[in-house]
Image (cartoon, rainbow, N blue to C red):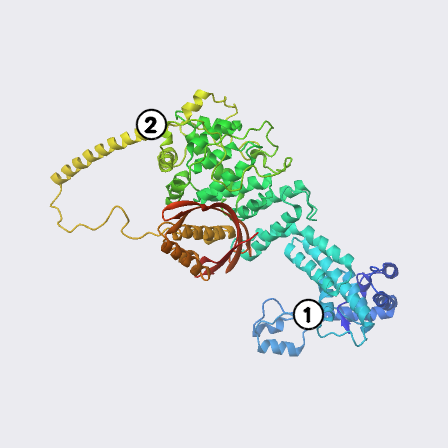
Amino acid sequence: MRIPLDHYRILGLPIQATTEQLKQAHRDRTLQLPRREYSEIAIESRKALIDEAYTLLADAEQRQAYDAQFLGRAYTAEALTPPKTSPAAGTATELNPQVGEAALRSLAADPTPVRSPEPYTPTVDIADAQFVGALLILLELGEYELAIRLGRPFVTHGDANLDDGRYGEPQAVRADIVLTLALACLELGREQWQQNQYENAAESLETGQTLLVQEDSFPVIRSELQSDLYKLRPYRVLELVARPIDQTAPRRQGVKLLKTMLQDRGGIDGIGDDLSGLSTDDFLRFIQQLRGYLTAGEQQEIFEAEARRPSAVATYLAVYALLARGFAFHQPALVRRAKQLLERVGARQDVYLEQAVCSLLLGQAEEAGRALERSQEYEPLAFIREHSQGSPDLLPGLCLYAERWLQEEVFHHFRDLAQQQTLLKDYFADPQVQSFLETMPAPALAEPPQSTAAPDALAPGTMAFGPPPAMPTLSAPVTPAYTDAPVGNTSPTRSVADANTTPREEIGLSVAERVSQLSPEGQLQASGSSRSFGSSQNGHRPSAAVVPPEPLDPSERSSRSPHWGRLAGVVTVGAVTMGLLGLVTVRAFSWVGSAFSGPRIQQPALDISLIRPPVNIPTPPPPEAQIGIKDIAERTITAWLSAKREALGPEHTMDNLETALVEPVLTEWRNQALGGERDSWYYTFEHSVEVLSVEPDDPTAEALVVEAQVKEVAQFYELGTLNNRNSYDRDLNMRYELVRQEGDWFIKSMEEIE
């Protein structure tokens, strides 16, 4: 058989080598033995090929003849290679004169482009018994892909067959070929790794590992392959998530690899070993580097799950993701979850500034002011106070700070939000935001957690990851993951006007309306100050002043807390005054118009109502690319719980069951609702949902299995009377099976799990 080698390459020499160099190369090659796992068959066949090459080249006459033949074939192959552009028929005589007459006539007759032949590859004839030795020499010369291509047919039940014994003892030869292929995959993977071809490197390493697992042999080499695969994982994650956003499959693979690494480490700041070779500090830097390639939805999915370990680092990163998505996509429910996560670390770290931003976006102006009073972030507070001059509270400065902090310090950590421009005015003007804030329960009054310990090193403003601070470990969450009672420093007494203010009025007067009036364009501009909004040295806090603000005394606190009842009265009087003025103005213009205009057009009036637009203007759904897998699950389950409240409620409205359920559970819950209507009983429900896991982890899948924790507070009424015995307040661990039908998601089955 022939192999793609020549005698010079077997000895590792150029064609210009001297006789002394031939002797030295032969001696060195003979003394350099391969790995001890090789059999005597491979070692002897390799030595025989080296000896044959030396014997031929050491003889002057044989070497001269070999060189002439070697160079002649190479020159002929080069001469037969046509130029890049095929010549026309009339220029065929301009070709290399070494080309034969037949070739010239062929080119003249057919001037179409000719495919260039492969470059000349010298070959040598070897005996079949020397094949394993030839593979070993190719491996030593770095011809890894060639060795794999020649050896693979012998181990994949291809055309090659070892059973006839002509290559040597079948079992020993097969083991040698498997060993050579595994080592070639190992070295090829490392070579591709050095060339920054991380996925190709992983494919090569996994090919070698799969081969050894199938053969159940060479455990030492298998461990080397596995070790390299572990060390390669961070590079693969970066390469995969750096791909374009529309390449969903490889990006999801990168996220899965990252989740596996986090699981092996026991979290971002865990003490486990993922065998990547990254220390805790290195891994934190890796996470920081990675964030710029991940979307806000991907970061929310990853870090919100990690925050449940619990992990202070993951909690803060999840807050960033939730806040960014909530503000950018006008989803206050995400802001609410961010605020609840902050409550976990509020007793150990100064996160009051972030809590103030969350309260602002939730329309809770008083609570935002209380959080600012407790914050020790001097430079941001100085900026907020400076831009709230002339205001009874800190709301103008907080609005300016929040909008700029989110856009300039938060958004750039997310691949899909780096260029996002969102204004507070647009956020509060969104009807969905207004609807959510209207129905959101008012925050419960609670005393702040007392803690004499100093804030942890992992303060919000120190998440620079270079070098990272000491990582604290929380023994347990301070509060449940999702509750409706945020912890904050609330005033023990409230005025009568405050107590009677509804959430709708508080939102409309304290935040949304005032935000829209902060500048003529609705953009929060610093009035009366030309100071630029920058960042502090830690890279995460904007700073606008170098002099720390003086602490607020009780009189300042009371003056900065707006009295909503009084403000409502002022607004009411102003509205009445403006209405009267507008009426007078309209009448005046009407009189002037009738005096100077031509005859009126007598036509039937258009039937256009001011209550609703003349045509339906659908609200565009959020882009599919921005919907994460957990968002899909949470929306579907929330829609079902809403339909359940209506179907089992006092009115027993069952229309929405069909928008949330499909068979077989659709008929089951419809019958239950019909039974309640027939027997005169109903429930009132309060729900909160936390999605724990979703499988498969792919938004393009057609079916999902979701595990979620549902808090259900139910009051049972029978014949209009509350029945406390059948009422309950339970935390349910549920498993839902979701299916996609015509682009919408429905629940197909559900069960409670332990």
| Quarter residue 38 falls in | bottom right
Name above or below for residue 742 compared with residue 362: below
Q: CA distance from mark 2 to mark 1?
A: 97 Å
Q: Which residue is mark 2?
A: 566
Residue 725 at least partly seen: yes
Q: Secondary structure at mark 2?
A: helix
97 lies above or below 443: below
Q: Nearer the viewer, residue 569 or 320?
A: 569
First in residue order: circle 2 vs circle 1: 1
Above or below 118: residue 627: above
The kind of secondary structure element at disc 1 is helix
Residue 547: give x, y in percent of width and height.
Answer: 52, 23
**Image position, residue 45 (x, y; %):** 84, 68
Q: Is residue 686 visible?
A: no
Q: Nearer the viewer, mark 2 or mark 1?
A: 2
Percent from the top left, x then y, of residue 429?
Answer: 37, 41
The type of residue carrying mark 2 is: Arg
Residue density around tag 1, few if under 14, some if 14–19, many if 20 or more, within 10 Å: some
Residue 667: assigned label? none
Eyeballing the image, is 579 above or below 669?
above
* Residue to which mark 1 is pinned: 79
Where residue 464 sits, quadrant-wise, is top right
Other residues around mark 2 within 10 Å, as few (<14) / some (14–19) / many (≥20): few
Closest to the observer, 521 or 305:
305
Residue type marked 1: Ala
Residue 462 in the image, given as x and y percentages of width and height: 59, 34
